[in-house]
Image: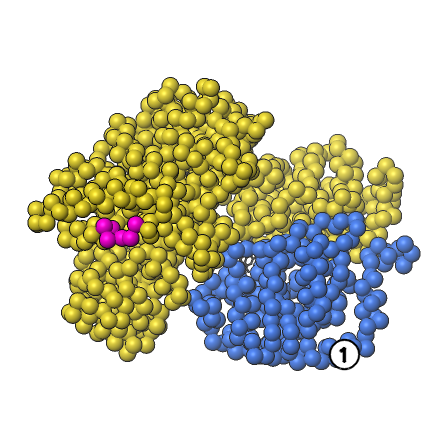
Amino acid sequence: MKFIGIVGTNAEFSYNRLLLNYMQKHFAAEADLEILEVTDVPMFNESDDQTNSPIIQTFNDKITAADGVIIATPEHNHSIPSALKSVLEWLSFNVHPFDGKPTMLVGASLSDQGSSRAQLHLRQILDAPGVNAAVMPGNEFLLGNVQLAFDDEGNLKDQGTIDFLETCFSRFMRFTKISNLLNIPEEITFTPGTFDVTTPGHNGDLPMKVTLSKKRIEKIDIDTSKETEGIADVVFERIPQEIIDGQTLNVDVISGASITSHGVIDGVAQAVKMAGVNPDYLRQRPKAGALQAIPDEEYTTDVVIVGAGGAGLTAAAKTLQEGKQPIVVEKFPAIGGNTVRAGGPMNAADPEWQKQFPAIPGESHTLQEIVAMDPESIDAEYRPDFLALRDQLQTYLAENTDENSYLFDSTLLYRIQTYLGGKRTDLNGQEIHGQYDLVKILTDHALESVEWLEDIGVEFDKSEVTMPVGAIWRRGHKPAKSVGYAYIEALSNYVKAHGGQIMTETDVTSLIDEDGRVCGIVATGAKGQKITIHAQAVVLASGGFGANTQMLKQYNTYWTEIDDDIQTSNSPAITGDGIRLGQSVGADLVGMGFSQMMPVSDPETGELFTGLQVPPQNFVMVNQQGQRFVNEYGSRDTLTQAAIDNGGLFYLIADDNIKATAYNTSQEKIDQQVAAGTLYRDETLAGLAQQLGMDPAVFEQTIANYNRYADEGLDPEFGKDVFDLKVEKAPFYATPRKPAVHHTMGGLKIDTKAHVINETGQVIKGLYAAGEVAGGIHAGNRLGGNSLTDIFTFGRIAAHNAIAEAAE
Amino acid sequence: MKLIGIVGTNSDHSTNRQLLQYMQQYFSKEAEIEVCEIKDLPAFNEPADKVAPATVQELSNKISAADGVIISTPEYDHSIPAVLKSAIEWLSYTTRPLIDKPVMIVGASHGSLGTSRAQGHLRQILDAPELKARLMPSAEFLLGHSLTAFDDNGQLVFPEKVQELEECFEEFRDFVTINNELVKNHQAKAELNRQFSWELDANGGQN
Ligand SMILES: Cc1cc2nc3c(=O)[nH]c(=O)nc-3n(C[C@H](O)[C@H](O)[C@H](O)COP(=O)(O)OP(=O)(O)OC[C@H]3O[C@@H](n4cnc5c(N)ncnc54)[C@H](O)[C@@H]3O)c2cc1C
Ligand SMILES: Cc1cc2nc3c(=O)[nH]c(=O)nc-3n(C[C@H](O)[C@H](O)[C@H](O)COP(=O)(O)O)c2cc1C
Ligand SMILES: Cc1cc2nc3c(=O)[nH]c(=O)nc-3n(C[C@H](O)[C@H](O)[C@H](O)COP(=O)(O)O)c2cc1C
């Protein structure tokens, strides 16, 4: 028989450890007792899941594989030590190796009581549903006055005590045998057939057909059409496979797509139930491929790239084009990062193309405003460009006075708008604007990036020039296929077709730094194995830190407040890892205090595309008291700060006509959300106010005023001057909104060759960074559509220099 | 009256933290409650020198200076979280500021039972000889369904729970006053308790 013994304390000296050592020796002929120490187990923390750390995986794997467990607990303050409690918490959180496991308690203490109270607590703890151990009843082995119990060889002195321990142990061997019979999987027989089931997915219903034979789950056919391409795909590739391979419903959900994952698992469970079997039996089965310890891995390549988002895949494709071999390591099961979520086109000035489109009202006014700016207000490094732009604009404006004028653009206009758009001052009075040399590269090479992407296989829809939200100007190049995914699909196809390697579920934890040169990475694989990759250069492309609230709060100098429970539109993977990796080798940071919020996000999930999202001219925003509080046509940061000042949560009000202008939804989704309580609907304004806990009279007055301002075209309260529809036709809707983190402008300091720069202004050899992980370009505020340009431009630059300099 | 509220968890999102923050604000006229975190204390590891790390000493000083302590505990696996246990172990192993200190236990859980089992354990723990806290007898405040208990402004939305908490808190204030009268004349015994050691005890007082 194979047992695991757990020493219930992290103290350097422990009688309980002596006791287990003694048992190991004494019972060696009957059982193999392997002793595990809790000393290196981190303190349990729900907010910092370390289930995948090697130490917890060791506990999990060994306990799972053992026939039974013996816990030796000291008594601290009438209970068990925190160090033991912490391990039990980890092992009842995301993994549950104690479930049904035969367990014996022993304890030694200095008092006569011999840890009796601690053992009673421990029994109750092991009985909690998350632990659910099969604790042997009775047979309490309590070793009191333990300081007198052992001789110098660590053997128990008292024969009576030894006899009792032997009795307890032999009972435990029998108990283990019998208990484990209960752990043999339940015999199951399905009523064979194909079952149609539907569960809620992320974007609506998720219908599927599940085929069961008498003994097996044979086939899972899912209608995947509604779920998000590029995000939910891995779920469909992996979860049905794991269910069928392991004939189990005990499968891990995919991080970043847990909703779809649960949809699939629950659907199969429903079918199993329809076939007459309790799905819990299948949930208790082991995972597919569980328990296989994976050996550590080691690779050597030319360039290793951290993160398979847009910047990382671009660097990989460029590496291949230059005849070198890249490995891209990605911590999530799915590639794409935030890039796959991007909803907008990318910016690039292409005057020849833009010329084909007529100008629209207001655009010449924007240009006139630039011409009218005082050159002294422009920072010196941008002033020559500004003056040259002013000449361009004056010429254009002089020649284009009629309605037939065309859409103007130039690299200079793009550069100055990027600069002006990013210029901000934080709460400490610190001014920031984009670093000139980086902004120049971005704007000079943007069009080249579009053309490069076309070569890679991204097809753009040239029939339309769009203005991404928050972009200030119409210079957006929009892929023909669904936006963010189009880039990721083309780039990853290119990388794979040309022999590049992308390793998913590989979380980079440190850089290899030899003689002041970065030459590889160390990562943790899906099964906890250590993966080492040696390379001539490392490119950090791991994105920003929008999903790391602690880090946002640590650096924030721009917002008066960032809530602990603030949501984000970002992938949960975007936690600033690359910034920490860079810092570990001395990297300097820039602009870290500046983050961009999306004011109109879902308060529960941070997503943009729930509720009714309508064009800003139709935004009617009211606070929790039912009053308007801001000019709804304002910029993202004005709306965000106004929302923060009004307690965060606010509502977007719509009537039936405004609802019709929503671009994100369908009647099915609306009904689903109303039913779920995430969107409010009512036949009257007063009723809506009541649902929202507002004073109906206040709310009705607010809407009456808004409608009057819409008629008059001007809002004397907050200055809204662009209106479309009024709020008048029932039913009325309220979409709850709250600002969520959208983008982080700050990051690693880089130079024009994408080198990471250290705190003394020197290049860190072998280390490059591209994309949201780097700072300096977007400064205080990123223009919509500029990130994509950034990642495809600097991703190429990073790879090019990494290869060129390795050759030197 | 000056009280210390200890958040019994290191989780970023805790309804027990919300509960203490709510009490702090709701009872601001009756008492000054300082909410203290334990998430940055090191994990207890029985160091031979028995010296409290700076963060533990800081918490200990606050407790010593306060008239009473409120502990808000989550329930993990039918007991208190390891991180709270670790904080208590530090206090019991080094400075022992809880001796004779009036303590009120509250707790919030996502399920319906409101940490009843964790609170039971916590009472037994605080009664251990090296802690000897003065626990308010028989009054428990259990907040079940804690995920829906607070609105966006941190207000407790169950009216019957607000009332129960008011009653409990009033009783606790009386308890603090009476207890602190009682222990005035008890300094010598408290000092003895501070000297208590399981090692000494086990050796019949000979060390
Ligand atoms: C909802 C949404 C909409 C947006 N819309 C637009 C838009 O319309 N236009 C625009 O220009 N910008 C937009 N943005 C911003 C833009 O998408 C991002 O700034 C950009 O995609 C960042 O690209 P990246 O390659 O730097 O990082 P990402 O694409 O985020 O990729 C980083 C990758 O690194 C991986 N990673 C992180 N840490 C590790 C580690 N330790 N080990 C291994 N891998 C790691 C991550 O899992 C991720 O896959 C939007 C962002 C969001 C969230
Ligand atoms: C545009 C967009 C589309 C998404 N589509 C899906 C989807 O189809 N399925 C899914 O489970 N999650 C999807 N998500 C992600 C979830 O909204 C959420 O961010 C994610 O589930 C959180 O991580 P978790 O699943 O690990 O909890 C999408 C997010 C965005 C921004
Ligand atoms: C490892 C673990 C074990 C848990 N065990 C319990 C339990 O036994 N009883 C319970 O009511 N809640 C349990 N929970 C759920 C909640 O964390 C618990 O209800 C807690 O009291 C909520 O308090 P908080 O909001 O301050 O974290 C457990 C959670 C974790 C992570």
- SS for dot 1: helix
**Residue A458 inside the magenta-drawn segment:** no
| Residue at left offset 51%, top offset 52% | A554
Quarter of the rendered image showing ligand 1? top left
Q: Point out residue A335 in the picture as x, y percentages from the top left corner.
A: 38, 36
Point out the stretch of residues depicted in magenta. A370-375
| Residue at left offset 25%, top offset 41% | A388
**Residue A373 inside the magenta-drawn segment:** yes
| Residue at left offset 76%, top offset 49% | B47
Q: Nearer the viewer, residue A802 or B177?
A: A802
Give the chain letter for yellow: A
The structure's colour scheme is: by chain
| Image: A509 above or below A319 | below
Q: Residue furthest right?
A: B206
Left or right: A777 as drawn, with respect to A100:
left
Q: Point out residue A250 in the picture as x, y percentages from the top left corner.
A: 46, 42
Q: Point out residue A237 in the picture as x, y percentages from the top left corner.
A: 36, 35
Q: Nearer the viewer, residue A729 or A378?
A: A378
Packing grade of label 1 (10 A; few <14, some 14-19, many >=20) is few
Q: Residue furthest front?
A: A376
Q: Which residue is mark 1?
A: B182
**Taking the image as drawn, is residue A225 in sight?**
no
The quarter of the image holding the N terminus of chain A is top right
Q: Chain of mark 1?
A: B
Q: Nearer the viewer, residue A635 or A132?
A: A635
Give the chain letter for blue: B
| Image: B170 above or below B201 | below
Left or right: B196 as drawn, with respect to B57:
right
Residue at disc 1, CB closer than 8 Å to ligand 3: no
Amino acid type assigned to the residue bearing label 1 in the image: Leu
| Residue at left offset 76%, top offset 57% | B94
Number of numbered tags placed on the structure image: 1
